[in-house]
Structures are given as structure tokens and as C-alpha cells.
Image (cartoon, helix red, strand yellow):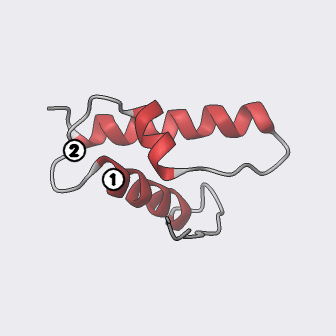
Amino acid sequence: MSDNVDLFADVASSLFARLYAAFPFPIDIEIDEMADAAMPDADPSGATREAFVEASLHWLGAAGLIAFELVRWARA
């Protein structure tokens, strides 16, 4: 099991790499795709991989490092 701080670094670096590649345009982030890309075999303590990615994005937003709009889609 990876340490949550290391997993957060993986999520953040994956996100910033995608943002850098698209700069200056905004991008859409799919939480499940980000979880698969940033931490494919991870088992974060206390959360699912998707919940961990979402919490990481919220932390980055609260810290003022990113701005985003959360959109939830109903799955059929």
C-alpha cells in the first residue's frame, strides 16, 4: 500500500501534466480516468481511488492552485 502523501503527489503531477499540455485552455477531467492514470494499482487508506482523486482536486482548489467546476453525470 502506498502512502497517501505519495498518492496525492501522483494525482497532482498527473493533473498538472495534463493542464500544462493543454495550456492555456481548460480541460475536462474524468475522475475515474484520472484514478486509472495516476494511481492504477493504488489502495489509498480510507477511500476509494475515485474518492481520493476527488478529495485531492478539492484540496488543490482550496489551496488556490487550481479552479474547477464539479459536474456530476448520472450514469445510465
Query: Residue 59, position in %: x, y?
Result: 44, 61
Q: Nearer the viewer, residue 47 or 76?
A: 76
Q: Secondary structure at mark 1?
A: helix
Name which residue lies at 45% across and 47% down: 32
Residue plotted at (39% across, 60% down): 55
Left or right: 2 as drawn, with respect to 12: left
Tell me, yes or no, whether the two marked residues, 2 and 1, touch with CB atoms within 8 Å: yes
On residue 44, the disc is 2
Residue located 66% across and 35% down the image: 18
State whether residue 42 is above or below residue 28: above
Say whether residue 15 is left or right of residue 37.
right
What secondary structure is found at the residue carrying circle 2?
loop
Q: Pinpoint residue 8: horizontal percent, then vertical percent.
A: 37, 42
Spatial CA span between label 2 and label 1: 7 Å
Residue 37's disc is none
Q: Residue furthest right?
A: 24
Dot 2 amino acid type: Pro
Q: Give the mark nearer the N terminus: 2 vs 1.
A: 2
Q: Amino acid at mark 1?
A: Phe
Q: Is residue 2 left or right of residue 59?
A: left
Pinpoint residue 31: horizontal percent, then vertical percent. Answer: 49, 51
At x 30% / y 34%, what residue is drawn? 6
Q: Position of residue 57 (x, y in %)?
A: 49, 56
With respect to residue 65, does 39 lie above or below?
A: above
Label number found at residue 52:
1
